[in-house]
Amino acid sequence: MFKENYNVIGVMSGTSLDGVDLAYTAFNKKDQWTYQILHSETVAYSPEWVEQLKNAFHFSTSELEALNVSYTKLLASIIADFISKHQLVAIDAVCSHGHTILHQPHNGFTLQIGNLPLLRNLLAHTIVCDFRVQDVALGGQGAPLVPIGDELLFSEYDYCLNLGGFSNISFHENGTRMAFDISPVNTVLNYYANAMGLPYDDGGAIAKTGTIHAELLAQLNGLTYYKTAYPKSLGMEFVQEIIFPQLHSFPISVPDVLATFVEHIAVQVAAVCQPNTKLLVTGGGAYNTFLMDRLQQHLPSVQITIPEDKTIQFKEALIFALLGVLRLRNEINVLASVTGAQRDHSSGQIYS
């Protein structure tokens, strides 16, 4: 018999490079899973770490191995500080996603750094991590992994949309949970805000001043990825090799690029959602009021819900905490219907 209550730390670092999200969460399992985020925090990366993680896509094998060790040490330090700051004693496990550097499921390969056994040695707590590798080995995309959490924790919504480095969505279709990555979001928006000396486009204020470039928008919406059947997923390779060359091919202002790309995001999300439904929106993009306004314009009959700050900001850390608990119980935490793997499975390394 498994116990009903778990106290775990969920740790997530997304492709938007905002920092490391930590969520100390209490889970209870009776008839269904319930949760309470007790403590949460985002620890920003230093400018040096942002540059390293941004450029690691180009690193050699030996450079990646060295980065993996140094990043694992950084992660251990961040988690240890979080535990100390909040005086956490009851910890069943630290459930960590790590940080995605390479994601090439079509080549049978994905790399999330920070998942070395060294993490267990440095923290002296049970670690559950490296959730994507097994799925890719089983022929899956290794992503998205959040839908099992949507299924178990947010079933009252027809669609669960996360607007982070990329947008991803999960929903029921013919009684089966489906999910996929829709398009880049903050990986692109933040890049152009950074070019103006800003960490991000606050509320979409810059994009709001721009003009949509019709030809660029048409080219973006016409990309092959959007016509591909799901399950499917995206990585920084898509942004670097396909999106940026498209955006750089037009000599237009940064506000115009941002306005056009916001419209592109809204169009692609709207293409997925059916009318007269309920949509939950989380992730940093939920704070982009211009993007949310454009999305509502494209989905006039959809009830869009933006939850309280903790769920907006820490939903992915929360769900990776749940994935870790499910792995400890040897229960399914990855759905083949959303990743395309050979079967549902319980994924993740346990270092106890």
Image: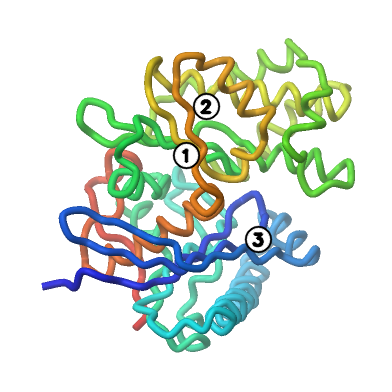
**Residue 136 % position (x, y):** 38, 52
Q: Which of marks 1 and 3 precedes in the sequence? A: 3
**Residue 1 % position (x, y):** 10, 73
* Residue extending farthest left: 1
As helix, strand or loop, the secondary structure at mark 3 comes to: loop
Residue at image position (33%, 39%) is: 338
Residue toward you, 2 or 345: 2
As helix, strand or loop, the secondary structure at mark 1 comes to: loop
Residue at image position (38%, 16%) is: 276
In this rendering, would 120 be left or right of 195?
left
Q: Label 3 amino acid?
A: Gly
Q: Which of marks 2 and 3 precedes in the sequence? A: 3
Classify mark 2: residues with Cα within 10 Å, few (<14), some (14-19) or many (20+): some
In this rendering, would 48 be left or right of 234?
right
Residue at image position (48%, 18%) is: 271
The residues tagged by marks 3 and 1 sit, at their Cα atoms, a distance apart of 22 Å
Q: Which residue is mark 2?
A: 225
As helix, strand or loop, the secondary structure at mark 2 comes to: helix
Q: Are marks 1 and 2 in contact (CB under 8 Å)?
A: no
Classify mark 3: residues with Cα within 10 Å, few (<14), some (14-19) or many (20+): some
Instruction: Kindly report which numbered mark, 3 or 2, lies closer to the viewer in this rendering.
Output: 3
The residues tagged by marks 1 and 2 sit, at their Cα atoms, a distance apart of 9 Å
The quarter of the picture where the C terminus appears is bottom left
Q: Label 1 amino acid?
A: Ser
Q: Which residue is mark 1?
A: 233
Q: Which residue is mark 3?
A: 19
Q: Which of marks 2 and 1 precedes in the sequence? A: 2
The residues tagged by marks 3 and 2 sit, at their Cα atoms, a distance apart of 28 Å
Q: Label 2 amino acid?
A: Tyr
